[in-house]
Amino acid sequence: MSQGLGPTSGRVVEFGPGTGALTRGILAAGVAPADITLFEMSPDFVTHLRQTLPGVTIHSAAAQLAPNLVPKGVARVISGLPLLSMPSGLRHAIVKAGFDILAPDGVFSQFTYGPNLPISPDVMADLGLSVRKGPKVWLNLPPARVYHFYRA
Ligand SMILES: C[S@@+](CC[C@H](N)C(=O)[O-])C[C@H]1O[C@@H](n2cnc3c(N)ncnc32)[C@H](O)[C@@H]1O
């Protein structure tokens, strides 16, 4: 999920960081804490993230509110949200929020455990998105595949 990120890649926003496993990967790639913003809805996870990730901006808020809280021009949105198990309206709102804050060449990265695209074709068509298939991560349990979405 953090492939291609580094100290000069720009601002990164993560949706649904949970315990912060992906956030630690983003930091390990070299992204400065000041360039990372998290949106997490669970107050318990927010408390844990604030205790363990100094310097990272953490919003106790839903991902779909990101355009109200983050300036446009983000380089990458990394989503740990289970998008496909969400109602279609919410899924659409979250992906749209991601692209509302992304720079024109920004990328929305999402993993999935299943065989289908983690962003459904109707949402892709509505927002004018293309997709690049990333690697299958066999060592993840269960194995997962990463997809990178961008404006067509
Ligand atoms: C599958 S977990 C992420 C796991 C995380 N990658 C980890 O390693 O701990 C999904 C997370 O998204 C959060 N979440 C669910 N809906 C959300 C939303 N609309 N906005 C922000 N966070 C949300 C949940 O509270 C949960 O922590």
Image: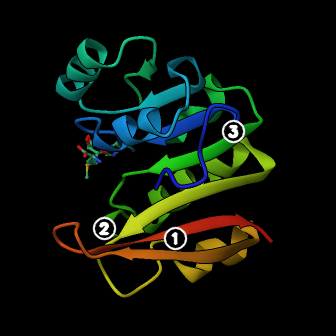
Mark 2 in CB contact with mark 3 (< 8 angstroms): no
Residue 90 drawn at (x, y percent): 46, 56
Disc 1 marks a residue whose amino acid type is: Tyr
Q: Position of residue 114 (x, y in %)?
A: 31, 81
The image position of residue 139, as x and y in percent, is 22, 69
Quadrant housing residue 19? top left
Q: Earlier in the sequence, mark 1 or mark 2?
A: 2
Residue picked out by circle 2: 85
Q: Secondary structure at mark 3?
A: loop
Q: In the image, what residue type sits under mark 2?
A: Ser
Residue drawn 64% across and 26% down?
A: 70
The label on residue 147 is 1
Q: Answer above or below: position of 130 versus 33.
A: below
* Residue matched to label 3: 9
- The answer to which of 134 and 152 lies nearer the viewer is 134
Please tell me whether residue 133 is drawn above or below residue 67 in the rendered image: below
Label 2 to label 3: alpha-carbon separation: 31 Å
Judged left or right of residue 108, residue 81 is left
What's the distance in space between the residues labelled 1 and 3, CA to CA? 19 Å
